[in-house]
Image (cartoon, rainbow, N blue to C red):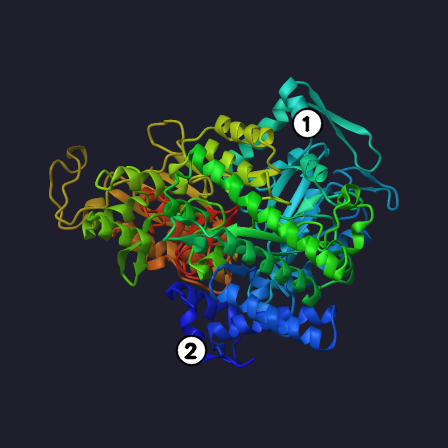
């Protein structure tokens, strides 16, 4: 099929979308230069996935189905009505041909099993996939190992080994892998597991979740004791008060968003293949998979189905797109080059696929429906029921055409007499980069922002949603000043210049209470085969009780899991702080004014009113005691401690300690601290120091997503920004939930859809 260059006009891609495609998806030559256009990429994918038709038919019939499917697949992508997950866009029709985003591996209670899985993890990460692990089969720490008469080191120690391996292997040659670690709430090591990410500098390539059972939740509700049992033999090793253990989980999530929880009994109650129990999920917890299973994902852009002439959804076109997308995803299973034979067998046996949605917030705005309203919830249920029903209809049609899934016998589908091709058909996954390509809002989340301040060279310019600009001009309330004001706030809900009816529908994630976030997740969960990747955002002032309420609400509403994030909770940990007056340490960062230009008049008690020609002369030596704070930052060279001390004039000195003394990196860090100290002593503004250092890369970033530090200078800038600049600590916006620096471009990262994304360059940890 030749490329019709006239069809280039069919691709309405933003500048950001084209940049993301060029950087991550398009074929490249030996020099890293893109050698295909976006339309050629979509054609490559459509052609390759359509080849799956040849697995079921022969001769002219097969050729006819191939050509029809190729055209249908191409059109739903060119029109941006549907996008497959990133591995399919990247790898279909190329040498790697690994098309799945997520896998789950077993962790057996033996050294051979543990290290076989470690090898399999490396193979999957090399191919571009993410991995989930259930560590609940491992015997607890200090339990007897009969073969050696030694003792076990426990699940957390082996999770740390998997984490270290992830640091060394990039996904598909582009980025470090992502993992999910899950431990049952009744495992004796669950408390160590809950605390394993408490310091923000450990196990940073894992998301972690506690597998909550119905029995545990009953014990919490009844305020009774709960038994922790050795999985090796079922022996009860410890009895705890259920509420105390639940509180520990809640406080961890309040502190830094970890751990999340999955309601493992609810997941298995809905597991369509009970002959293969589920013990873990993929890294963002929306794909519930038994060991060695995988899932092929794709998302429909709901915004594209709005019809201006009717002011409603084009349900017929949506129905057709759902059916085409399900056929596409079933073909992906045939075309996939699975990284392990065990995964190949399980994936083809269960044929799990996950069709999700994106652009939901955009569609609500066009329909004039408020996200956090009963009308919004009712529409969510109606929409997802429609998508799910039509997805199952296509799966039944495929079963008639191609046969039921091989693991049909023993499945719940067989029990119901429902002949289907796929064990599951729907899930709502993160859509970070593919939603940017599609030009829509991510998943089922509210808008990230109506507008935000984007850095361009040394300037900050308002980047406003083009649909909002269009509306503002049509309604006559547009002005440059208003757009800048909206960009500084991120939201319009409290901007009085914007009409009330506009403010009610143009809502952002942080305009919405956690209760409405959970209720919206539950509305979609009601008609979704697997799970939902969504972030329940909480303000910084939220209490542990607020987190607990969200967890209880999610369980009561039959969600299958929940992830919360409290603004600012992933900041670098403050290790020490003190004042010369002997006051108790405070966790609130100081915000001294930048030193003013000379001449300087120090306090009368020091200089008796004398005027000095410079700040450095006024300081004239270091006082014996200074007020200070130390922040611990994880870097690619190890943990770094940044100490910032102030005197009566403001910021005075900075010490940077990295690892053991004597090494090159340690010497460099010490020198950097001394130069910053010299600059501060002479009146340099901390904001300028941050500006000069932030974003410097040395090829050894630390962590992924919110914990990514690009280099030692970047880490120092981050520490100084958090201490001195407060609202401007990561200055893409003042009020938006910035949680770290993007490892690609240095801009602010946000937590959305249960994942971490950069709205400037399109980086996504998950999609």
Q: Is residue 591 above or below residue 177?
A: above
Residue at 74% x, 68% y: name it: 56
Which quarter of the figure is the N terminus placed in? bottom right
Q: Name the secondary structure under disc 1.
A: helix
What is the crowding at mark 1: few (fewer than 14 residues within 10 Å), some, or many (at least 20)?
Answer: many
Q: Secondary structure at mark 2?
A: helix
**Closer to the camera in the image, 427 or 208:** 427
Tell me which residue sits at (25%, 52%) in the image: 684
Nearer the N terminus, badge 1 or badge 2?
Answer: 2
Dot 2 alpha-carbon crowd within 10 angstroms: few under 14, some 14 to 19, many 20 or more: few
Give x and y (percent) for residue 82: 52, 59
The answer to whether residue 516 is visible is yes
- Residue 99 on image: x %, y %: 63, 64
Residue under the point 52% across and 41% down: 382
Q: Which mark is residue 216?
A: 1
Q: Say above or below: 81 vs 616.
A: below
Q: Residue 334 vs residue 324: left or right?
A: right
Rendered-image quadrant of the C terminus: bottom right
Which of pointers 1 and 2 indicates the residue nearer the eye?
Answer: 2
Residue 197 on image: x %, y %: 57, 42
Q: Relative to the observer, which residue lies in front, 699 or 384?
A: 384
- Classify residue 484 as left or right of residue 465: left
Q: Nearer the viewer, residue 762 or 195?
A: 762
Q: On screen, 97 above or below 571? A: below
Structural distance between the alpha carbons of marks 1 and 2: 61 Å
Check residue 6 in the rendering and tell me which mark sits there, or answer none.
2
Q: Are marks 1 and 2 in contact (CB under 8 Å)?
A: no
Quarter-of-image position of residue 531: top right
Seen as rendered, the residue at the extreme right is 147
- The quadrant holding residue 538 is top left
* Horizontal and vertical percent position of residue 15: 37, 66
């Amino acid at each position: 099929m030749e490329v019709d260059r006239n069809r280039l006009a069919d691709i309405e891609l933003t500048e950001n979308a084209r940049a993301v495609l060029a950087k991550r998806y398009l074929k490249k030559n030996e020099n890293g230069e893109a050698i295909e256009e976006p339309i050629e990429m979509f054609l490559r994918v459509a052609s390759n996935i359509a080849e799956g038709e040849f697995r079921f038919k022969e001769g002219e019939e097969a050729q006819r189905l191939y050509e029809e499917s190729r055209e249908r697949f191409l059109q739903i992508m060119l029109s941006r009505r549907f996008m497959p997950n990133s591995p399919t866009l990247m790898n279909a029709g190329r040498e790697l041909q690994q098309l799945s985003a997520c896998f789950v591996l077993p962790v057996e209670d033996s050294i051979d099993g543990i290290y076989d899985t470690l090898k399999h993890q490396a193979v999957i990460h090399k191919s571009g996939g993410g991995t989930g692990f259930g560590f609940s089969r491992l015997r607890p720490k200090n339990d007897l190992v009969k073969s050696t008469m030694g003792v076990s080191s426990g699940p957390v120690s082996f999770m740390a080994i998997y984490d270290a391996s992830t640091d060394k292997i990039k996904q598909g040659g582009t980025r470090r892998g992502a993992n999910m670690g899950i431990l049952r709430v009744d495992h004796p090591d669950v408390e160590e597991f809950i605390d394993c990410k408490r310091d923000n500098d450990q196990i940073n390539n894992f998301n972690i979740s506690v597998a909550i059972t119905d029995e545990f939740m009953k014990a919490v509700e009844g305020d009774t004791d709960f038994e922790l049992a050795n999985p090796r033999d079922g022996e009860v090793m410890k009895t705890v008060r259920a509420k105390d253990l639940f509180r520990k989980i809640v406080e961890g999530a309040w502190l830094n968003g970890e751990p999340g929880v999955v309601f493992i009994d609810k997941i298995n109650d809905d597991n369509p293949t009970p002959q293969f129990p589920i013990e873990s999920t993929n890294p963002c917890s929306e794909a519930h998979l038994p060991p060695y299973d995988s899932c092929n994902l794709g998302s429909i852009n709901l915004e594209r189905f709005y019809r201006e002439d009717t002011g409603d959804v084009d349900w017929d076109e949506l129905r057709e797109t759902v059916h085409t997308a399900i056929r596409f995803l079933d073909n992906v299973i045939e075309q996939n080059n699975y990284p392990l034979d065990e995964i190949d067998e399980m994936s083809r046996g269960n044929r799990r696929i996950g069709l999700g949605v994106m652009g939901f917030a955009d569609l609500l705005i066009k329909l004039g429906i408020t996200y956090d309203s009963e009308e919004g919830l009712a529409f969510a249920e109606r929409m997802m029921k429609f998508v799910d029903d039509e997805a199952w209809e296509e799966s039944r049609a495929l079963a008639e055409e191609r046969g039921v899934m091989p693991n049909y016998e023993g499945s719940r589908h067989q029990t119901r007499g429902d002949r289907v091709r796929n064990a599951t058909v729907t899930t709502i996954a993160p859509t970070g980069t593919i939603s940017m390509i599609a030009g829509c809002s991510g998943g089922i989340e509210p808008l990230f922002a109506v507008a935000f301040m984007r850095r361009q060279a040394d300037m900050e310019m308002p980047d406003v949603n083009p649909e909002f600009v269009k509306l503002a001009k049509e309604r006559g309330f547009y002005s440059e000043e208003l757009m800048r004001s909206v960009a500084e706030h991120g939201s319009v809900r409290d901007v009085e210049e914007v009409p009330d009816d506009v403010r009610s529908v143009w809502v952002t994630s942080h305009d919405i209470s956690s209760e409405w976030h959970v209720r919206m997740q539950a509305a979609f969960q009601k008609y979704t085969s697997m799970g939902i990747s969504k972030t329940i955002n909480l303000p910084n002032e939220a209490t542990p009780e607020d987190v607990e309420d969200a967890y209880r609400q999610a369980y009561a509403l039959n969600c299958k899991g929940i992830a919360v994030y409290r603004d600012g909770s992933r900041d670098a940990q403050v290790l020490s702080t003190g004042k010369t007056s002997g006051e108790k340490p405070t966790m609130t960062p100081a915000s001294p004014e930048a030193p003013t230009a000379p001449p300087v008049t120090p306090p009368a008690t020091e200089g008796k009113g004398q005027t000095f020609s410079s700040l450095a002369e006024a300081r004239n030596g270091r006082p014996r005691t200074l007020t200070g704070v130390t922040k611990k930052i994880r870097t690619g060279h190890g943990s770094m401690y940044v100490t910032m001390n102030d005197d009566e004039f403001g910021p005075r000195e900075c010490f940077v300690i990295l690892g053991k003394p004597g090494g090159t990196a340690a010497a460099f860090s010490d020198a950097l601290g001394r130069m910053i100290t010299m600059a501060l002593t002479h009146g340099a503004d901390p904001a300028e120091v941050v500006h000069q250092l932030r974003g410097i890369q040395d090829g050894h970033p630390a962590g992924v997503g919110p914990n990514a530090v690009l280099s030692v200078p970047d880490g120092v800038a981050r520490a100084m920004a958090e201490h001195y600049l407060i609202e401007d600590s990561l200055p893409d916006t003042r009020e938006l939930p910035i949680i770290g620096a993007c490892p690609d471009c240095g801009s602010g990262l946000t937590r959305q859809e249960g994942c971490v994304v950069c709205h400037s360059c399109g980086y996504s940890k998950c999609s």
